[in-house]
């Protein structure tokens, strides 16, 4: 060990050092070359207690000058050594002057907690030291300690000065502690310091960050003098709240008031310009920077310009700025990578990241890594994502919560939800974003029940639930049709003040619509404080899947008067609604109006809706020609829509042609096997169906098993066809057997074309009985009170036999049944379905009621239940002695029937089975809405063979025939 004499400093050396040396200590290396001559070893050298060597005591002024040097040069290790040497000599250890110097040294070196420990030992801190300590917390956090220290300062009797308020107001800004900020503002007024430039600027910043823009503007307007910092506070505040026009107005006004914008102004202005995608304005600001000769090497301004161009999707300019920058920091690299990710250029983002890594890992930070993880997620690049995960672990950046959340989202989006859940469980620290990410990931991967479990865990852990979390969890209720869970979430949203958020309300509208409660969805829509375009699109789509096309169109017509312009998504929702309701003429009108009136170029989704619309109406040739005339090549979804229509309308020739087109699309065309096989089976060509199924197996394509869900008492029960794992399985199957007996008495015949072809007919019927939707309905009949409606959800489209059987079940069980399948809602009531029996009806017809003397407009009444049967509305009210004309696609088909009706009663036959009309008779149906209207006549055209001529049964009001 060195002798203690080695640490003694001659008086002449001290004199030279203090007299001449301190003026020369401008670098850390110079300071370190002198300080060890009189500083003991650091504590890290394990010299404790009596092991510490003895040093000659220095006077207070010497220690003070040494501490000042450490403060100026941020020499923490040397400052810590001096602190320990002072502590060793009791004569200086309690000197308030030196203790203040030590506090300032630790604050300068960023050791706020060390400074606080020394500060608490100062007998009577000066106002300067109080301010310094409050400022340290205000700048470095925790912010609440700055406010606590301020209150302690007031309680100690120390008089505050004008420097105290800006620091504590900054802490209020960081916490968004509006209540504390208002109290301090009142104290500023009582102290008569409201006109102080720095205090007013701090007040503006506090009010802006707390969301009180009017209060901030009031403080700003009362300022007698404003410097560029005050203007920048207003600009930054407006940017924070995304107020593009207000931000630009303040910048223009500050120049009119002869206050020249500085680099901080531009750094505050450019983000909101980028978010607004105001590229012209952004270029003007760029030109301003050039004309005003701002330092071209200013990293902050150049990075802000780069970020603005990237957010405006002008990557050419962004990359040019990036390449011309001589100095780049972590934010610069993060901005260009984030820009590529934002514009969907993931490969370019990865290339820039590799270039960044080659520059040195020291510039790789959490923000750039979060962007790269998003790129991996978008590309589905699991392997590269794992490599980034490994780097995060090695670098220690895995501890950053934002990076951890991005990694969580990456695993979920690439489909490895098990890895996401494992990582989530291993996370030491979780925040609201973590829970939101894993909930969204579960939903995206079809694990809706697990998403609800995670949400329950989140609530029980007292984690704050925000709007983003609710937007993530509500779709889980939609997926499962878990109405009770959805209502509980709605109540939670209301009680926690989230009901004013448009995205939350939009999610609720979608949830209620998909859970069969379109009336509640409409109520949520009508009570929204402010509807956006997504709100209108969501409610229009909701009406569409319920087959309420007229209501969807009515809402659409109200959209523009409400001040909102329809977008391309709006027309997808509208065309889909027209398709589900059979509104062919309206669908065609809005498709062409979309381009001619609204200047929206149709994309693939619009063409899919139109093909589906024409196919549902039986206009198969027109649909095929429509596809051929598309301005771009049709994808598999378009052809599959037409193939499904061929199966419904039994057009084998066109179906085979469409199937060949699908097979040309490569591996993704394997999904057509099921539709083509069903087409062959439906037309009795079982050998061809068998060949298709063999090809399907050879290519490794498997059909997802049908699954139905039913909720009762907050518990969702899942059923798979033929499955007997449910605890009440024996009771469910017994109930199904009983139902089968009852509905057969009503005329039900199993449609075995929906069963496997290579089994006996009896086995086919047996297999059809145990489809998942039938099991769910039987369970509902067992558990629900008599007459209570049943609501079930199915992951696939409900098969035609089940559809037919459910109509009979509504008559046998005397209750309404609603089924939500993969395409739409089916509302079954009194042996009828709201979808219009798309499986059976192969016609497009317009029904007109004409006077005896001259044609007149149809006397119609809109009804959701029947709006799909005909091109126009459904219920027809006939006056006595009117002639019923039936037109097919505008052409007169038959006008020979003269129907006379007597008021009061009539016989009406109800269409139930594919074989024709049942003997079910309804007596005394008036259907009248006024004395001018007489009984309702329901007319349905059934498909029987290929006849193009109609034939009348003179004893009934039912016309039999086939029309295309």
Image (cartoon, grey):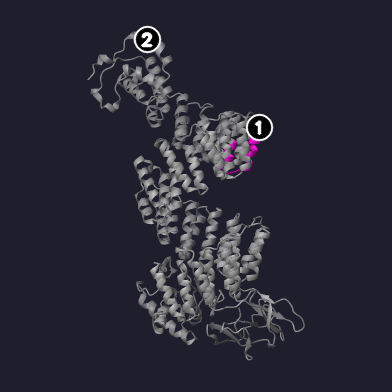
Q: Which mark is on residue 15?
A: 2
Name the magenta segment's main secondary structure.
helix
- Residue at the left extreme? 1
Provide residue 633's location: percent of width, then percent of height. 55, 62
Magenta part of the chain = 234-254
Q: Which mark is on residue 255?
A: 1
Q: Is residue 130 magenta?
A: no
Up the image or down, 31 lies above or below 299; here it is above
Provide residue 416's location: percent of width, then percent of height. 39, 55
Relative horizontal placement of residue 230, taking residue 448 as reference (left or right): right
- Residue at the bottom extreme? 955
Relative horizontal placement of residue 902, taking residue 674 as reference (left or right): right
Depth check: give the residue in front, 634 or 490: 634
Quadrant of residue 898 within the rendered picture: bottom right
Provide residue 692's location: percent of width, then percent of height. 43, 73
Residue 516 visible in the picture = no
- Residue at the top extreme? 12
On-image quarter of the C terminus: bottom right
Mark 1 or mark 2: whose residue is earlier in sequence: 2
> How many C-alpha atoms fall within 10 Å of the one at disc 2: few (<14), some, or many (≥20)?
few
| Nearer the camera: disc 1 or disc 2 | 1
Q: Secondary structure at mark 1?
A: helix
Q: Identify the residue at image location x=58%, y=34%.
A: 265
Up the image or down, 760 lies above or below 868; here it is below
Q: Identify the residue at image location x=50%, y=86%.
A: 747
Instruction: Give the spatial CA distance, label 1 vs label 2.
Output: 55 Å
Residue 285 visible in the picture = yes
Up the image or down, 735 lies above or below 121; here it is below
Q: Secondary structure at mark 2?
A: helix
Quadrant of residue 586 within the rendered picture: bottom right
């Amino acid at each position: 060990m060195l002798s203690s004499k080695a640490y003694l400093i001659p008086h002449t050396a001290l004199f030279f050092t203090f007299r001449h040396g301190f003026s020369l200590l401008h670098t850390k290396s110079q300071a370190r070359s002198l300080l060890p001559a009189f500083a003991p070893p650091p504590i890290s050298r394990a010299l404790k207690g009596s092991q510490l060597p003895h040093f000659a005591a220095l006077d207070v002024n010497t220690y003070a000058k040494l501490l000042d040097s450490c403060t100026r040069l941020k020499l923490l290790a040397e400052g810590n050594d001096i602190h320990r040497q002072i502590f060793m000599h009791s004569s200086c250890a309690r000197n308030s002057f030196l203790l203040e110097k030590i506090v300032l040294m630790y604050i300068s070196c960023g050791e706020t907690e060390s400074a606080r420990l020394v500060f608490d030992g100062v007998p009577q801190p000066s106002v300067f030291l109080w301010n310094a300590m409050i400022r340290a917390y205000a700048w470095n956090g925790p912010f609440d300690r700055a406010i606590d220290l301020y209150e302690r300062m007031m309680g100690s009797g120390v008089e505050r000065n004008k420097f105290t308020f800006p620091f504590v107001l900054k802490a209020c800004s960081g916490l968004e502690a509006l209540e504390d900020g208002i109290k301090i503002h009142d104290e500023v007024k009582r102290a008569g310091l409201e006109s102080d430039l720095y205090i007013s600027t701090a007040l503006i910043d506090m009010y802006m960050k707390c969301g009180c823009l009017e209060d901030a503007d009031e403080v700003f307007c009362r300022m007698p003098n404003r410097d560029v910092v005050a203007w920048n506070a207003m600009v930054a505040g407006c940017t924070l709240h995304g107020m593009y026009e207000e931000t630009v107005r303040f910048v223009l006004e500050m120049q009119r008031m002869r206050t020249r914008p500085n680099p901080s102004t531009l750094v505050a202005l450019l983000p909101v310009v980028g978010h607004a995608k105001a590229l012209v304005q952004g270029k003007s600001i760029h030109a301003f920077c050039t004309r005003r000769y701002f330092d071209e090497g200013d990293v902050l301004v150049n990075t802000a310009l780069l970020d603005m161009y990237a957010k405006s999707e002008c990557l050419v300019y962004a990359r040019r700025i990036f390449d011309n920058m001589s100095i780049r920091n972590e934010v610069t690299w993060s901005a260009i990578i984030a820009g590529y990710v934002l514009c969907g250029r993931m490969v370019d983002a990865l290339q820039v990241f590799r270039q960044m890594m080659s520059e040195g890992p020291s510039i790789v930070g959490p923000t750039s890594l979060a962007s790269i993880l998003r790129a991996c997620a978008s590309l589905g690049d699991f392997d590269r994502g794992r490599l980034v995960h490994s780097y995060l672990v090695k670098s220690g950046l895995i501890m950053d919560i934002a990076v951890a959340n991005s990694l969580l989202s990456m695993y979920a989006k690439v489909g490895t939800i098990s890895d996401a859940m494992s990582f989530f469980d291993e996370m030491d620290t979780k925040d609201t974003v973590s829970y939101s990410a894993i909930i969204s990931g579960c939903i995206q991967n079809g694990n809706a029940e697990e998403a609800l479990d995670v949400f329950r865990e989140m609530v029980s852990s007292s984690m704050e639930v925000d709007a983003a979390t609710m937007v993530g969890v509500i779709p889980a209720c939609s997926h499962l049709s878990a109405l009770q869970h959805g209502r509980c979430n709605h109540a939670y949203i209301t009680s926690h003040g989230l009901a004013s958020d448009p995205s939350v309300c939009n999610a609720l509208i979608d949830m209620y619509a998909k859970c069969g409660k379109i009336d509640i969805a409409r109520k949520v829509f009508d009570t929204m404080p402010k509807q956006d375009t997504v709100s209108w699109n969501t409610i229009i789509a909701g009406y569409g899947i319920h087959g309420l096309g007229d209501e969807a169109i009515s809402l659409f017509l109200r959209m523009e008067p409400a001040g909102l312009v329809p977008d391309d998504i709006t027309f997808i929702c509208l065309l889909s609604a027209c398709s589900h309701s059979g509104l062919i003429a309206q669908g065609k009108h809005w498709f062409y109006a979309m381009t001619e009136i609204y200047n929206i170029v149709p994309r693939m989704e619009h063409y899919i809706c139109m093909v589906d619309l024409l196919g549902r109406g039986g206009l198969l040739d027109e649909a095929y020609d429509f596809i051929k005339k598309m301005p771009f090549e049709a994808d598999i979804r378009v052809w599959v829509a037409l193939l499904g229509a061929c199966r419904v309308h039994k057009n084998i020739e066109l179906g085979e042609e469409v199937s060949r087109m699908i097979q040309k699309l490569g591996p993704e065309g394997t999904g057509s096997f099921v539709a083509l096989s069903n087409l062959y089976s439906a037309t009795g060509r079982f050998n061809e169906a068998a060949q298709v199924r063999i090809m399907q197996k050879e290519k490794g394509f498997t059909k997802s098993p049908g699954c139905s869900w039913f909720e009762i008492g907050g518990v969702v029960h899942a059923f798979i066809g033929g499955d007997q794992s449910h605890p009440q399985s024996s009771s469910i199957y017994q109930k199904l057997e009983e139902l089968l007996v009852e509905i057969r008495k009503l005329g039900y015949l199993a449609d075995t074309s929906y069963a496997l072809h290579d089994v006996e007919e009896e086995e086919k019927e047996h297999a059809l009985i145990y489809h998942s939707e039938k099991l769910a309905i039987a369970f509902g009949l067992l558990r629900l009170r008599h007459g209570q409606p049943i609501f079930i959800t199915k992951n696939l489209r409900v098969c035609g036999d089940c559809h037919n059987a459910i109509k009979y079940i509504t008559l046998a069980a005397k209750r309404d049944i609603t089924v939500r399948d993969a395409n739409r809602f089916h509302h079954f009531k009194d042996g009828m379905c709201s979808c219009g029996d798309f499986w059976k009806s192969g016609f497009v017809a317009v029904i007109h009621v004409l006077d005896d003397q001259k044609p007149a407009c149809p006397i119609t009444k809109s009804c959701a239940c029947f709006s799909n049967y005909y091109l126009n509305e459904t219920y027809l009210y006939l006056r006595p002695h009117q002639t019923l004309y039936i037109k097919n696609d505008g052409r007169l088909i038959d006008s020979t029937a003269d129907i006379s009706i007597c008021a009061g009663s009539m016989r009406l036959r109800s269409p139930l089975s594919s074989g024709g009309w049942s003997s079910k008779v309804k007596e005394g149906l008036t259907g009248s809405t006024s004395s001018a209207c007489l009984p309702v006549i329901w007319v349905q055209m059934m498909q029987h063979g290929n006849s193009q001529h109609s034939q009348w049964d003179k004893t009934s009001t039912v016309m039999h025939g086939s029309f295309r």
